[in-house]
Amino acid sequence: MTAEPASLSRIETNHPFRGIGGMLGVELRVWFPWRVLLLTIAGLGIYATIYIPWRISGVKQLGALFLWSMALWLIFLLFATISLSEGTVLGDIERGTASWLVGMPIGRPAVIAAKAAASAAGVSAAVYIVGGVLYPLFEAASREGVTRFRVDELTEVTSAPIGKWGVYVTLPEAGQYFAILTAIALLGVFLVAVMIALGSMIRSRTAVFGMGLACFAALMVGWLIARDALAVSPVGLVTAVTEGLQTKPIELAVPAAATVASSLALVALATWNFGRRELS
């Protein structure tokens, strides 16, 4: 009597997001702790470069500290997001890592989803950490800085932009300040999605970086010349930040929803491009 070999079915997982847990862990380690720490130190360093001369000057006008610190930090953060994200997809393709990954039991959509989620988490963490540290520092400065104006200065203040170029400003309430940080974080997430989408389509890192900068410039130009027409877009978040810094009422829900939808659409486009792209 001979025994016939048993027929065993091979167990496979075929869903497109197989392996996403492991990929997410790897990508989170790219951002945490070092990239987030770098962005945090840089953000606090920008504040220090404004605070030290502000303190020495003796004038101590809150607007000069608050508006300049926040504006320079926003510009740096968005620029750094573009720089740190330009090789998120294309870098792995050039190094051959992407080809090696998809040869394992990892779905191509899982690769893009993990990169997008980890990058968004890293940028958002840096925004809330820096913003959370700065708020009590701004509060302390507001107690000794110039935040009020005399009656005879009313005409000058109201005729000058941003409250006489930020001389007479008050610190936003904690809730509005948190809304400003949320708008900044969502702008960073949007740029991450842009860079991932570009990296899935273009083979030149220089071109990806240049187009990322062009997108950043488009946000600024759109805010300058067509902010009302582009309110239902990421440009609306730029408006929310600038209005919020002046303690004006802001509309966050609509531009935030539009930005999240745009970011998800860009990630979906990147997933589709990555799925059909030759990686070798």
Image: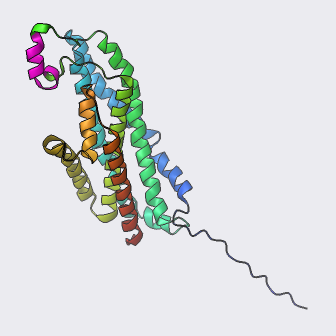
Q: Is residue 158 magenta?
A: yes
Which stretch did the figure color magenta? 153-164
Rendering coords of residue 252 (x, y %): 33, 38
Rendering coords of residue 237 (x, y %): 28, 40
Q: Nearer the viewer, residue 262 or 144?
A: 262
The residue under the point 26% across, 23% down is: 66
How many numbered circles does the render carry?
0
- 267 relative to 162 in the view: left or right: right
The residue under the point 47% across, 41% down is: 32
Residue 80 lies in what quarter of the image?
Answer: top left
Q: Residue furthest bottom?
A: 1
Q: From the image, give the main secondary structure of the stretch colored magenta.
A: helix
Residue 160 lies in what quarter of the image?
Answer: top left
- 185 relative to 164 in the view: left or right: right
Residue 161 lies in what quarter of the image?
Answer: top left
Rendering coords of residue 45 (x, y %): 31, 27
Q: Is residue 25 magenta?
A: no
The C terminus sits in image quarter: bottom left
Asked whether residue 3 is in view, the answer is yes
